[in-house]
Image (cartoon, rainbow, N blue to C red):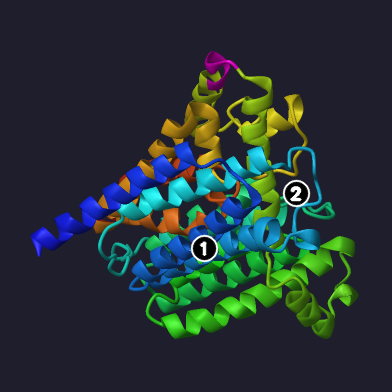
């Protein structure tokens, strides 16, 4: 068995060397980019199958595969109306490198991916009515005052950061619920409020995050993979409905027959990752065309690292915003690996794949309570950190770590106080 595993690792390593050699020897063209886009879809499906034993992670990987399918169909295999309408940086050089970065990132993850991932489990919920009540009050406050109630149009939707991170408070609410039925009903009701409100104001990703969290917590023993597949198609239909709604913010804009026809015409392509992929292209174009000095890119990385702990996202550490303000227009977002390409070139992309591989290999196999909580938030935030910003991943891990320590301290204090009385 060990010999077989070593043989597979050797084959993967050889495959990675061959991929690098291919990049060095074969220039990008429309034909090679189409082929590489198809390979990206294939690798994403392999990774999805490897995660089938963990329902929440399976859902997250389905989302990634769907995004990659949408990018491949929208920008390479079909194009036309399915592609992002901006043309400023669309050429063989930039978009050829864009898909190659994604392929290198996915293949590197596949090389270091664990043989199998078992069911992701949460720590046993603690029974702490005081902390639970505080968290529920905070969530109600966020539901009432934490959302930007001005409607946006088109691709951009204004969702406040505190609303985006509400999934962390939901996670800790469940953790302090004691697994009691009425507390879980309260959590489920608030989740529905957040989801419906997000949809009403044209959002989609935040709602998806909360749904994945529900699979990790309230519904952890209730959903099978077959049901997930059917629910995925329902989610695609709902996403398209929300896309139609947010053009005019009128429920009358939602016509089921028209939506089904749109899905058929658009070959089920999801527009958000397509726009995010264009933003990734602007990351690359800024380096290729303006030759941004390495010290300026390192400065961006330093600001990014500061943002993890300090929370600011309006400096050069926000690569997409930085590029938009100084070099090329984009509609926001940007795939995870191109941020690292901006900071460190191809080595940066490889480091990005190593980070994700370490998470899958070390975090997901740990019995540590904190790491179990982090595992869940990593899965829950996949829809945001994969196509928007790496900051979501690292900051979520940081916030969960801080809140977990505070919660354990608070649980100890309240428990001892209750015993003394």
Q: Which corner quadrant of the image does residue 120 belong to?
A: bottom left
Q: Which residue is mark 2?
A: 158
- x, y percent for residue 339: 55, 36
User: Is disc 2 placed on a helix, strand or loop?
Assistant: loop
Tally of marks: 2
- x, y percent for residue 148: 76, 50
Location of the C terminus by quadrant is bottom left
| Closer to viewer: mark 2 or mark 1 | 1
- x, y percent for residue 298: 51, 20
Q: From the viewer's perspective, is 1 left or right of 404? A: left
SS assignment for the magenta stretch, majority: helix
**Badge 2: residue crowd in 10 Å (few <14, some 14–19, many ≥20):** some
In the rendered image, residue 296 lying in the magenta stretch gets the answer yes
Residue displayed at 60% across by 57% down: 34
Location of the N terminus by quadrant is bottom left
Q: Which mark is residue 41?
A: 1
Q: Is residue 315 visible?
A: no
Residue displayed at 49% across by 53% down: 168
Residue displayed at 44% across by 55% down: 377
**Badge 1: residue crowd in 10 Å (few <14, some 14–19, many ≥20):** many
Q: Residue furthest left?
A: 2
The region drawn magenta spans: 293-297
- x, y percent for residue 361: 27, 52
In the rendered image, residue 80 lying in the magenta stretch gets the answer no
Q: From the viewer's perspective, is 95 left or right of 156? A: left
Q: Is residue 339 visible?
A: yes
């Amino acid at each position: 068995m060990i010999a077989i595993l070593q043989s597979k690792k050797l084959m993967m390593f050889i495959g990675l060397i061959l991929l690098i050699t291919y990049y060095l020897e074969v220039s990008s063209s429309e034909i090679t980019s189409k082929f590489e886009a198809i390979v990206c879809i294939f690798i994403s499906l392999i990774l999805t199958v490897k995660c089938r034993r963990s329902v929440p992670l399976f859902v997250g990987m389905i989302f990634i595969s769907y995004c990659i399918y949408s990018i491949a169909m929208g920008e390479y295999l079909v194009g036309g109306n399915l592609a992002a309408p901006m043309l400023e940086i669309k050429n063989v050089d930039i978009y050829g490198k864009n898909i190659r970065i994604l392929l290198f990132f996915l293949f590197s993850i596949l090389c270091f991916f664990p043989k199998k991932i078992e069911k992701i489990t949460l720590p046993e919920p603690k029974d702490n009515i005081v902390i639970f009540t505080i968290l529920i009050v905070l969530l109600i406050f966020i539901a009432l005052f934490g959302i930007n109630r001005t409607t946006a149009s088109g691709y951009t939707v204004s969702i406040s950061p505190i609303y985006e991170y509400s999934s962390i408070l939901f996670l800790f609410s469940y953790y302090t619920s004691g697994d009691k039925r009425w507390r879980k009903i309260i959590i489920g009701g608030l989740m529905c409020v957040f989801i419906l409100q997000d949809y009403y104001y044209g959002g989609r990703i935040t709602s998806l995050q909360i749904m994945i969290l529900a699979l990790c917590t309230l519904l952890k023993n209730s959903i099978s993979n077959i049901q997930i597949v059917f629910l995925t198609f329902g989610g695609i239909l709902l996403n398209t409905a929300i896309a139609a709604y947010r053009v005019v913010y009128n429920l009358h804009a939602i016509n089921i027959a028209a939506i089904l026809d749109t899905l058929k015409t658009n070959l089920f392509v999801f527009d958000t990752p397509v726009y995010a992929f264009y933003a990734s292209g602007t990351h690359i174009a800024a380096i290729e065309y303006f030759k941004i000095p390495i010290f300026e890119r390192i400065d961006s990385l330093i600001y990014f690292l500061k943002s993890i702990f300090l929370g600011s996202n309006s400096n050069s550490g926000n690569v997409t915003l930085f590029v938009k303000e100084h070099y090329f227009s984009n509609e926001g977002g940007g795939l995870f690996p191109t941020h690292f390409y901006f900071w460190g070139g191809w080595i940066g992309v490889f480091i990005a794949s190593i980070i994700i591989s370490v998470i899958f290999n070390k975090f997901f196999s740990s019995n540590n309570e904190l790491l179990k909580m982090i595992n869940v938030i990593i899965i829950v935030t996949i829809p945001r950190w994969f196509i928007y910003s790496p900051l979501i991943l690292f900051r979520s891990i940081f916030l969960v770590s801080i809140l977990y320590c505070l919660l354990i301290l608070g649980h100890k204090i309240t428990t001892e106080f209750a015993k003394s009385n």
